[in-house]
Amino acid sequence: MGLDRLSLAVLLLVVVLLAGCDSGSDRPERLLDGQAAQEFRPVPGSVIALGRVLDGTTLGGRFTSCRPAGAGVRNDAVVVERIAVFAESLTFADSGHKTLYGCDGGTDAAGERKPPWCGNPAGLLFSGKLLDPRLDVLCRDPKGRPLAYAWVEPAAGVRWVGVDQGTYTEIYEVLAGLPVRIASARGVQPSRARATFEVTQYDSHGKELVKGKLEAAVAG
Amino acid sequence: MKAFLVAFGIGVVLAGATGAQAYHRFWSNCNYDAPTFMTTMTRDAAQDYANAARYEGYQWGGGCWNYDDVDSYPYDTPGDPSAHGEGGDCSGLTFKTWRESTDDWRDGRYYWRALRNVHGPYTAGDFRNGVGAPNHVIGKATAGVMDAFASSTHIGMIFTRSLYGGDQIVEAKCEACGTNIFYRTYRSDPSYGGVARWGWTG
Amino acid sequence: MRRPGIRSLAGGAAGIVAGVIGGIALTSVSAASGPTPAAPGIDAVHIPPVLTLAGEPVRLRYAIVCAPRDDGEPCDGSGSVFVRAGQSGPFRQLTLRRGEDSNDGRYFVDLPREVASSRAGFSYYAVLRGGVNGAEITVPAGGEAAPHRSVPLGAAAEVPLGVHVFGRGRAPDERVVAAAWGSEVGQAGLVGSRELGFVGPSSFDVATDGSVAVLDQVNTRVERWSRSGVKATPVEVSGGLADFVLEPEGTMDVLEPPNRVSPAPVLRSFRGDGTLRWAQRLSDRTWAKLAAGPSGPVVQQQPSEQWLPVAEHGAALSRPAQAGHGRIGRPFASGREVVVERVGTGELRLAELAGDVVRSWRITSATPLGEVQLAEPYGNHLVVVTKTYTDDQSEYVTLVLDRSGVVSSFAVESLEWAESAPLARFRLAGDSLYRLGSTRAGLFVDRFDLEVSR
């Protein structure tokens, strides 16, 4: 009888331990759209956010529901689409390359905007560069967590931008010569309209070139 | 005892150094008090509030101000939110004048004192798109007192129409410009749209 | 060296902690005792009905603006309007009533019919009070000495514009200036910031010899384009969006906006070589437009909504002197003045006065009308440039008017990539209209010949 109880106890202990082991691997397996999440080899446990350079015509409704009217943005504008684990975005510029526009994905807490877009950031380009990350804290992820979106201007030689999401690093590819729209649910302070991102920038081989905090505030 | 006194002196210097830097920033004068929920919000009360922010400076990402009619830090680096200078930026001034909540799903009226440091979740572009429960897009031709005109990157509130067809706009324009009333032609400018606040009571 | 004992280390640590606490306490006291708030002064808003239609009832409305109240309620104000039929004689005091709505001004008075319908028009000023200290303001600033004047529009020529068709802008007859962005002579300065966007040269004027002078405030200079080339004259200006006028004898006047250290607008008068003659603060807090008057520069100012002279015969006028000479119309060398009133969303009333109304027009448009950039006599005609717009389009409409209506008209495309002064985009010189514009590539000034005999 004692041995039976002991065996049951051991079995239960094993089950608990195994369950604990399974939940300890927090690297997501899927992106927001259900695609398998790829890993960036130089950064173990990372997830590569899908990044595509398309034109607005190809994106169809995803772009027309985002494109600002009367802003000089062509129907066939070059658009960078990104789909990450819990966030998605579009980035594009007007035809004069004076203003950078975007759409940030998620749920609108005010319930006014239809999915997928809940935020419409915009920022002036000076010699093709943004001077402000254009933080957006208006969106919520599928779990209702506040999301923060911001643009990162990649440094020279940077090919990938990584954002520490706590249990994994989310990797964004630099595309089309445009700033990279990143997202995070960590370090978001909606009541103060601020967010802090832990950002690492890598070269094409995955070597870290720049690492630090991006502290952004809603402004302008 | 000697060690204590020497170290005490070092400690004061250390605190003083940090404290001096903090004092140099206007935000150390400001607070994070809760707003006052209000049942009324009239257009002329909003004129009073925005008018009082004139001369108080401009701060990207700001903010807060006192009522001494002086920009305490007029030469802060433009566009630097860490300068923590006096004043609001264009969208921050509008947010506070329009008594909005930091929760974008609330449309109630929340009165923020001038020294309360808050910007709110909206950029000028958000206002332009009518983002948030309190805000909505309106036709420019009929925009009235303390409605606003917003572009993707700037917003100014209508202080009043003017005889020559433009408007006197109360706006936090830029670090060098300060916050003031300027004559503008945003109404007829296609890059600007009309935006209004729900819930005026008079 | 003897190793420090435990007691010394502890004492040192305690000292640092105590010192930091003490230092923070001192700093907190000094941070808390920042500047004490001062109550802002009283301000006012009023749009005068300067041109009235026969039988039109007149309600004068005022907003009284004072220090914000802790309870969030509006200013507790009061006031009186002093009004008379005609333009001379004693004033009669009417008390302002407080209304329920503040959209057009909470305080109002309905003028008696005999005053509102007087064939000589009427004139008035208001004294308003508000705030905890009962501060006072007179609107217009000149009060009894230079009251608001309202004149009957009379038998105005009706000019119905209908619905504007966009996209048919007239091509210029000549591009007289084309300047790339930059700081070399012949280029135009452009400044950009995340707050301000893009700002280029804010204003320009055309000299009697046809040369075009551009206020390139970003590069702190005036550049002058003529047939013989480009010349730059340095001027000490703030760099803000300023208006600019060339006086006939060569003086250059620059009307500066308020800025971070000078919260009131200032007119700076420069000699032809760019040296400063004088700087004079304006009577009012806000300006719309600078023009060359018969005796010197005049400025359309708010809240008075009058044209006020800032200098006469080369000498600056004090603020009270400016206010004491306010008038409703822009004065011209002919002795006449042109009065402009934009009404509602699509109506523009114009009158040319020589004391009384000499001729007048009432322009109506189904497409909303924006600001009036220019309204000036041109021989026997009046040239008017106004903006027409929808929520996502705009164009300028140019009208050449005679006594009976429109003689000619054309549209001008709105091209303003960089920001400039609000009512400084057009100038009338000789037989041509000149327009300041900008694109991503640079600045330009176009000439449109009016092709109408004076």
Image: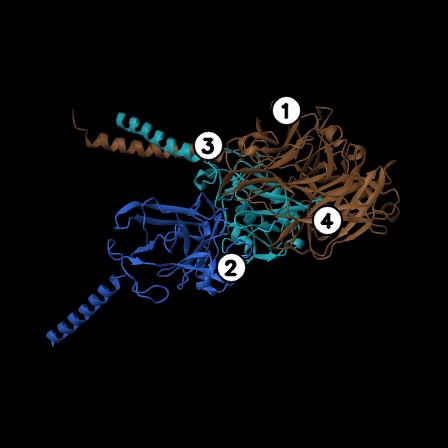
**Same chain, labels 1 and 4:** yes
Residue C245 x, y percent position in the rendering: 66, 32
**Same chain, labels 3 and 1:** yes
Distance from Cα at disc 2 to Cα at disc 4 = 50 Å
Chain coloured blue in this rendering: A
Q: Which of B121 and C388 is in front in this view?
A: C388
Report the residue marked by disc 3.
C30
Helix, strand or loop at label 1? It is loop
Q: Residues within 10 Å of mark 3 (few under 14, many from 20)?
A: some
Report the residue marked by disc 1.
C272
- Which label lies toward us, 2 or 1? 1
- Which label lies toward us, 4 or 3? 4
Chain coloured brown in this rendering: C
Residue C77 x, y percent position in the rendering: 71, 43
Instruction: State the image quarter where residue C273 is shown.
Output: top right
- Which label lies toward us, 3 or 1? 1
Marks 3 and 1 in Cβ contact (< 8 Å): no
Helix, strand or loop at label 4? It is strand
In the drawing, does residue A18 fall left or right of residue A60? left
Report the residue marked by disc 2.
B105
Determine whether A30 is above or below B28 in the image: below
Q: Which of marks 4 and 3 is nearer the N terminus?
A: 3
Using the image, name the chain to which the residue with label 4 belongs.
C
Report the residue marked by disc 4.
C409
Instruction: State the image quarter where residue C422 is shown.
Output: top right
Q: What residue type is labelled 2?
A: Trp
Q: Which amino acid does label 3 sit on?
A: Ser
Using the image, name the chain to which the residue with label 3 belongs.
C
- Which label lies toward us, 1 or 4? 4
Q: Residues within 10 Å of mark 4 (few under 14, many from 20)?
A: some
Distance from Cα at disc 4 to Cα at disc 3 = 66 Å
Q: Color used for chain B?
A: cyan
